[in-house]
Image (cartoon, rainbow, N blue to C red):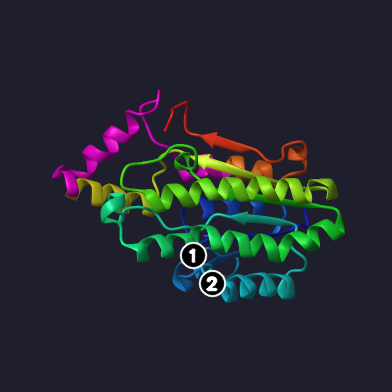
Amino acid sequence: MKGRVALVTGGGRGIGREVASLLATAGARVMIVARSESELSAVGLDYVAADLGTAEGCAQAVCETERRLGPIDLLVVNHGIGSAHERLIWEQDPAVWRETMRINLDGPFELARLTVGGMTRRGYGRLVFTSSTAGEKAERSGSAYSASKHGVIGLARAVAQDAGPFGVTSNAVLPGWVRTEMAERSAKAEAERRAVSVDQVWRERAALYPQNRVLEPREVAEVIAFLCSDAAGGINGEAITVALGGIW
């Protein structure tokens, strides 16, 4: 991985930050992207502050990475919006649907569209998309999130078919519950809705898994980093669940 150029979205915190750290340690030249410049600046890597829910923001991230670091070899699409603010489908605000798709699905499409062509011409590339266990199973009051994460898996598999003949792999990682800021927001929203404590929500989430705990961001990041490596060249078009043996 030494000398490879990596673009990691959602790199200011959580899983993205851990992935960026692992790739940098392995010798990659890493650019991280998110909307919060204050979070990005604290990581200690090259960064671009951009709205990846817009075509312009995606183009900015790609162009700045290529200008400053060189052609992109590794693309980790890890940014996203959660489901804490969603409602039952008959109560769902269409604006929530559109915002979720804009960030969770349109952005990944734009980033792939802008980078994969160059990878195919150079004969090498790795794409990893962070989906969710909700990408294969639907959650209650989560129509937009579930649909977008299903879509991310389809996008990863479509890229695998298009770019696979040219030495490029594309896979999706499906984490279960991870203790991230986004998951904390959903826990707080659920606790308020059910009139229970946030700790109770996390205990219930942990009970879904044989180890009676939830994931740490680093555990998901290790899988993503492996899929970015030369050693993972035989893995393409897969949706890999990282959920401690649980079914959710």
Residues at badges 2 and 1 in contact (C-beta under 8 Å)?
yes
The answer to which quarter of the image holds residue 179 is: top left
> In what quadrant of the picture does the C terminus appear?
top left
Residue at 60% x, 38% y is 239
| Horizontal relation, residue 128 to residue 233: left or right | left
- Which residue bears the numbered disc 1? 102
Q: Where is residue 197 in the image (x, y as percent from the top left)?
A: 17, 43
Q: Residues within 10 Å of mark 1 (few under 14, many from 20)?
A: many
Q: Where is residue 214 in the image (x, y as percent from the top left)?
A: 39, 36
Residue 1 in sight here: no
Residue drawn at 28 percent across, 47 percent down:
187
The relative height of residue 217 versus residue 75 in the rendered view (above or below) is: above
Judging depth in this view, the residue of 118 and 66 nearest the camera is 118
Q: Return the residue at label 2.
A: 54
Q: Where is residue 138 in the image (x, y as percent from the top left)?
A: 40, 40
C-alpha separation, residue under disc 2 versus residue under disc 1: 7 Å
Residue drawn at 23 percent across, 41 percent down: 199
- Could you say which quadrant of the image residue 153 lies in? top right
Q: Could you tell me the amino acid type at mark 2?
A: Thr
Please check the rendered image and state whether residue 207 is part of the magenta-colored stretch, yes or no.
Answer: yes
